[in-house]
Image (cartoon, rainbow, N blue to C red):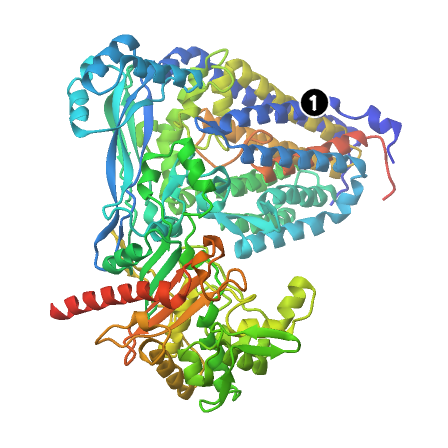
Amino acid sequence: MKPFDLFGAGELEEQKRKYSRIATILAVVFFILLLRLWDLQINRGGEFAFLSENNRIRFDDIPPPRGLILNRYGELLVGNWAAFNLAIIPEDVKDPKAVAKTLSGLVGLDETEILDKLASAKKRGLPRFLPVVIHPYMDWEEMVMVETRRYELPGVVVMTEPKRSYPQGKFASHLLGYLGEVSESELDTDMFDSYKVGELVGKSGAERFMEPMLRGIRGGVQKEVDAAGRRRKVLSSVDPVPGKDVYLTLDSKLQKTAQQALAGKYGAVVAMDVNNGDILALASGPTFDQEKFVRGFSPEEWKSLINDKSHPLQNRAVQGQYPPGSVFKVVIAAAALELGVATPQRSTVCTGEYRLGRRVYRCWRKKGHGRMNLRQAIVQSCDVYFYRLAEDLGVDAIAQYARKFGLGEPTGFPLAKEAPGLVPTKSWKLRRFGTPWMKGETLNTGIGQGFVLTTPIQIAVMCGALATGRVVRPRVVSKVYSPRGGEEVMPVVPSRPLGISEKTLTFMRDALVGVVNGLRGTGWRARIPGFTVAGKTGTAQVVSGVSEEGDEEVSFEMRDHALFVAYGPAESPEVVVACVIEHGGHGGTAAAPVVREVLKAYLKTRRAKEKT
Amino acid sequence: MIDRRLIQNFDWVLLFCVLLLTASGLLNLYSGLSTVGGVKKAMFYSQVHSLMFGYLLLFVAILFDYSHLERGSALIFGLCLVLLVAVLIFGRSAGGSRRWLALGKLVFQPSEIMKLGLIFFLAKYLAQGVPKGGLRLRELAVPAALAVAAMALVVRQPDLGTTFLFLLIAGSMLIFAGVHTQALILLSGLGLSFMPIVFFFLKDYQKERILTLFDPGRDPLGAGYHLIQSKIAVGSGGFWGKGFLKGTQSHLKFLPEHHTDFIFSLLAEEWGFVGGVVVLALFYLLIISCLNIARRARDPFGSFVAVGVAAMVFWQVFINIGMVLGLLPVVGIPLPLISFGGSSATVTLLGLGLVLNIGMRKFIFCRK
C-alpha cells in the first residue's frame, strides 16, 4: 500500500474537494428534513392541528377482568363487579350550571355539590379532557336515568370501573389480601414495568403473590371521537386477555369456624392436611374488612388502621412469632429419645422446682408433680422433667432436632412474606449478642421459653411431621385456571422425611394421645368422642413469674400466650390444627377449645362428603 | 500536559452545540416523562445521572493524547466483541430483546460501546494507508469480516436498528477513505441483489413497517399507528408549537415511546417549527464541526475517528428524524443526546469528547 499522504501536493486538493462534497450532501439531507418539517407544520399544520384538536383518534385502555379467587370446591371467594361512576368531561360541557341542574334531578346530588367537584378538579390543574368523577358507585336506576338522557347532557359520561367483590363477606382477609394503587417505588421495579400510574395491584395475600396470574393483559380500543368527546367510530380494538382464576386449598366451612372461634381475640389458627400440606383454614385476628379497600378509606380511617397497635393487617398465622412454650417439649422429648438421653422408663421426681447452681427454676405446678416418667411428663407437661432433659441434651442438640421439625426457617408458605422464627444455638448467641451461652438459657429453651420463637404455621408443620414422619411444605394454591388456556395444577412439593426413628415417633404419638385423652392430660378440652385427637398444650410466658396461680388479676398485656396444636384421627392422621391466642392464658383452657371447634367442623364436612 | 495551544485550538462551537442539545433533550424528556398522574422522576434522574457520567467521560477523553487510543484500538474492539458475546449469554432482556449487561448496579448496552469500538478499529486500519484508486476487495476483506462479526452478534439480540447503523458507519468510513470503483460497483450490486432476500427473512412486523411507509392507512392500529400519530403530533405543533408540557398528542398517550425513539415528535409538537429548526441546525453544526476537525487533524487516525463519530451522529439523526417525520420506516434508533437511554447518551458524549481531543491537538505532533 502507498502510505497515506495527507499533505501531498495533489492529495490536498483532492481532500478539500472530498470534504466540500460531503458538506454539500449534508446540507441537502438537512434541507430535505427541514422541508418535510415545513410541509408538516406550516403547509399542512392546520390540517394536523384540526386532527389533533377536533377529530382526535383516541386510544383507550380496556382493563382486563382480574382473575377470580375460588376455594377448593370451586366456590367463589373473590369476584368482580362493575361500578358505575358518573363523570363529567369539563372540556365538553358548554353550560356547567344547566348540566348540574339536570343531573341533580336524576341522581341524588346537589347542584352545588356537582359544581364544587368540577371547581376543585380545575383548581388541582387536571387537564380539561380528563373525566371528573362526581358520583361514584351509582346504582342501576340512576345509571339508566342518566343514560337515557345522554343527549341532553353533553360531556356527561358513565364510566364502568371493575371492582373486587367479596361474596363471603369478611372472610380470610389476610389470606386473600386486597388491592391498592401501584406505588411509585413499585413502578421503578422490573416486575411492574408494564403498569401505569394509578393502576390497581395486589398489595397482600393471594392478590399480591398471585398478581402475575390474576392480572391478565390489557386491551385497547382506537377510536375516532368528535369535538364533544363522543365516540364516532371504532377504528380497531384489541381485546384484553382476562386474568387467570386462582383456586385455593381453603375449605370455607373450616375457615368460617376458625374465624368465629377467633372472633374478638388476638391470635391465629391454621388447619392443614397433614399428608400433603394443603391449608384448609388460616385465620388471623384481629382481621380487617376488605370491602373497605374497594370503597376507599377516609384519611382518618386509614390512619387508625395503620396506627392500630393490634396490627390488624398482619397475618399472625405466618408472620406472628411466638415462644412455643410447652409445645416445644415435643422436640425436646424426641431429641432425648433419639440421642439416648432419655428412655421411656427413666423417671424423675418433680418437687415443683429445679436447681441449677444457685438459681431455682420452677415448674408451672408449684407443689410439684411427684414421680414422673417421660410419658407422664409430656401428658402433664411437667417443666422440671424437661429442665433436666434440656440440661442433658445441651442447646445445640436441641437446635439440631428443632430444625429437623422445620422450625427456625420459613415453611414455604407461598402467599405472604413469612417470618422465619428462631432456633437459638451457642454460636447464634455469640454472633447476635457477643456473649457466651448460659446454661440457664438451655433450661428455658427446654420449656420453649427464652429465645426460641415459632410461627403458628411452623407449629402446625411440626406437629404434622410427628403425625406422619414427613415434613410437608404448605400449599395454598391448588390450581390456576386460564379461561383461554386450560388449567395448570400447582404441584404438591414433595415432603422431606423427618429423620426420626419410628420407635420414637410411636412413643411420642401415644404420649400426645395421652395429653388429650389420658389421666390429668392438659389438653382434655380438645377431646372429641369417636375421633381420637392427639395434641400438645403450650403456655408461653410474656413476663416471667406472673403465670403462677391466680392470673385473673394480671393485666391483659402481661398475660401468657395460649397455644395448642393437635392432629387427628390419631390412628391414621388426616388433619392438623394449630392455634395461638395472644394473652389467652393457659393453652389447655384458651386454645384447646378453638382447635376442638375446628376439628369438629372438619369431621362434619368429612361426614358430609362420605355420605354423597 | 495541557498546553496553551490546546486551549486555543479547542472547538468551542462543537461543545456549545453538545451542551445546548443535551439541555434541550433534558427539558424535552421531562415533558415526555410527565403523565397525568405525575412525572416518572426515577427515569428522569437516571437520565440526568447518565448525562453527568457522559460529561465526565467527555472531559476525561479530552485530557490525554489520542495516539494512545490508536495503539489500543484493536484491543478495544476485541473487548467490545467479548461484551457482545457476553450479552447473548448473560444479558438482561426487556421487551423481547436481550441488550443489556449488568455489572453490579451499572446496567449498560454493549452494542452502544461497539459503535465506538468499530470506529477506532476501522480508523486504525485505514490509517495504515489507502492505495491510489481506493480500497480493493483484497483490502476490504479484513474490516468487512470484523464488521460483519459485530453485526452478527447484535442482530442476534435482536437489534436490527443498531446492526444497520454499524453497516452505515463502516460503509461511510470506508467510502470516505476511498473504495476502488470496481469494488464499489461489485459490492453495491451484491447488496442490491440481496435486498429481496433480506426482506424475505424479515419478521412480519418489520415488513409491515416498511410497507406502511408507502401506505400508512394499511394498518392504522399496528405499524401505521406510530406513523400517523407522530405526523399528527409534529404537524399540529405548527410554527410556534403548543408550549412546554402542553403537547396533547404525547400526553394523551396517543404516541407511545415518546420518551425514547419518538422524542423528536414531542419536541416538534411542543416547540413547533422553530424548535425543530433549532435542533436540526444544532445537529448540522455539530456534524460539520466534527468534519472540520477531521479535515485539520494532524494524522489520518484522528481524521478517520472524527469522520466515524460524525457518521455515527449523522446517521442516527437522519434515520430517527426521518422516521418521526414519516420519511423512513420505523426503526428502533434513538436520537443522540436527546432520547432517553443512558448508554446512547454516554457513548455519544465520549465519542464527541474524543473529537474535541483530536481538534485540540491538530498542531501538536508526537513521536511515534
- For image coordinates 32% across by 30% down, the residue present is A60
Do we see residue A473 in this rendering?
no
Q: Quadrant of the N terminus of chain A?
A: top right
Q: Disc 1 residue type?
A: Phe
Q: Residue at x 70, y 45 (%)?
A: B125
Count of marks placed on residues? 1
Query: Which residue occupies 75% across, 34% down?
Result: B59
Front residue of B207/B334: it is B334
Structural crowding at the residue carrying mark 1, measured as other residues with C-alpha within 10 Å and reported as few (<14), some (14–19) or many (≥20): few
Q: Is residue A546 above or below residue A25?
A: below
Label 1 SS: helix
Residue closer to the observer: A416 or B59 = A416
**Quarter placement of the C terminus of chain A:** bottom left
**Residue A284 x/y as whole percent:** 37, 54
| Chain that bears disc 1 | B
* Rendered image quadrant of residue A25: top right
Picture coordinates of residue A553 (x, y %)?
45, 56
In the visual, does B254 lie left or right of B239? left
Instruction: Check disc 1 and report the residue beneath it.
Output: B16
Please indicate whether residue B257 sits to the left or right of residue B4 in the image. Answer: left
Give B305 or A294, whichever is nearer the viewer.
A294
Q: Is residue B208 above or below residue A414?
A: above
Q: Is residue A188 visible?
A: yes
Q: Position of residue A45 (x, y in %)?
A: 42, 13
From the viewer's side, name the closer residue of B293 and B111. B111
| Residue at 23% from the left image edge and 64% from the top image edge | A601
The picture quadrant where one finds residue A416 is: bottom left
